[in-house]
Image: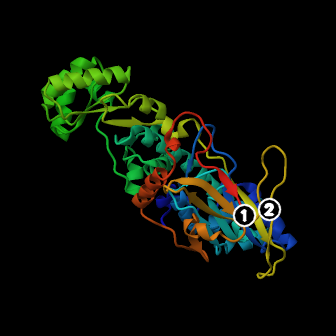
Amino acid sequence: MNTADLGLPVDVPSTALFTDHYELTMLQAALQAGTAERRSVFEVFTRRLPEGRRYGVVAGTGRVLDAVENFRFDADVLRFLRERRIVDEKTLQWLAGYRFSGDVWGYPEGEVYFPGSPIMRVEGSFAECVLLETVILSILNHDSAIAAAASRMASAAGDRPLIEMGARRTHELAAVAASRAAYVGGFATTSDLAAGFRYDIPTVGTSAHAFTLLHDHERDAFRAQVDSLGRGTTLLVDTYDVAEAVRLAVEVAGPELGAVRIDSGDLLLVAHRVRQQLDELGAHDTRIIVTSDLDEYAIASLAAAPVDGYGVGTQLVTGSGHPTASMVYKLVARAGSEDPKAPLVPVAKKSSGGKTSIGGRKWAARRLDAHGVAEAEVIGTGPVPAELADRQLLVELVRGGQVLGREPLDAVRDRHAAARAGLPLSATQLSRGEPVLPTEYV
């Protein structure tokens, strides 16, 4: 696996240091106590959705699989740990041979989830599973937050395409992950070439205001762009005067002009005026693209406007106000001894402040109503009821350390569209409310 495929700089040889210091000190103590090899089950879940959200979106699973496969303590990493005296020599020797050999089950990427949903389950020895906590949560929390925002925006946009253009509003590596998550959530294209290169997401882009300002006259800028990119290009028309720019754009490109982009002002009002002007100039097929700090609410407010597509940046890559999905990675079961055949014992954190969890290795299924619409997320630790046997959500992702769950990103994107369509209609409401499905424990 090339580290570039993970969105890593080429000089980072593995994902092993994408972790917290205390993961390694826990490992050292467990090795010394003789408990490190106890069979254990960890689960990723969230206790609640962000305020007002009706559903969550699982995103980043493919990146998690890459990260787990690339979790290796090579010579440089071991040297760093030794020089900093983070762990002792016995632990370093153990880490030198680390290869995850356990199993991973999870909701398939693109699926929706709710409070308590066992989004991912990691099974193996305590030692090999605990080390993966930080990198798994880092990926799933970020990507799921972006995908959830993207899903809401895609729902608000309806059939109108969305362009992801937030690379300049976040960390350069986070931008690539955000593009991928946005595509899962329903965006059609990205402006980020690194995301296009790594994940084969369609890329788009034409020009910014700087290109217009470079030229002596707006007409010259439009002529240069049309001469280079063709009449089907998108011309940015709000550098100076929108009405005059639209007139010049059609004059230069003709009625075959592909699109105009509006990046400022009262978008609803300006879009109506531009559509009328384009039609009067005979450019009936010229599309209108709007940008300018859009979120799902702004997109919804433009539903009645003559807009053909949206470009979204800042609000997308920041999760539209919720930059994390607040997922946790908790030990829910462990063997009573180091014997590989020892039965699993449910364990759970019991504390005040809303941070309790439910012990036991869990299954999850989605119950449908008589019309085939989802009505509840059902979670249990015992036998799966017969009526839910074919509605189980977790799928096998890793078996014995071997990755099984890789799939094309377009399949993930299609899965999310189908999962969202299978929810009650209230799932797409932007007004604040409770999760659209209740979580039932059996």
Q: Residue at x 59, y 68 (%)?
A: 387
Q: Residue at x 81, y 63 (%)?
A: 347
Q: Is residue 79 left or right of residue 365?
A: right
Q: Is residue 365 left or right of residue 404?
A: right
Q: Position of residue 128 (x, y in %)?
A: 70, 69
Q: Residue at x 64, y 56 (%)?
A: 117
| Amino acid found under the numbered disc labelled 1 | Val
Q: Position of residue 267 (x, y in %)?
A: 37, 24
Towards the viewer: 377 or 133: 377
Q: Residue at x 56, y 45 (%)?
A: 145
Q: Disc 1 to disc 2, how far (Cα)?
A: 8 Å
Q: Is residue 208 above or below residue 425?
A: above
Towards the viewer: 385 or 334: 385
Question: Which quadrant: the C terminus?
Answer: bottom right
Q: Position of residue 202 (x, y in %)?
A: 34, 51
Residue that numbered label 1 is attached to? 130
- Which disc, if any, is residue 354? none
1 or 2: tag closer to the N-terminus: 2
**Which quadrant of the view contains residue 80?**
bottom right
**Residue lying furthest right:** 33
Contact between marks 1 and 2 (CB within 8 A): the answer is yes
Residue that numbered label 2 is attached to? 26
**Which quadrant of the view contains residue 238?**
top left
Q: Position of residue 48 (x, y in %)?
A: 67, 46
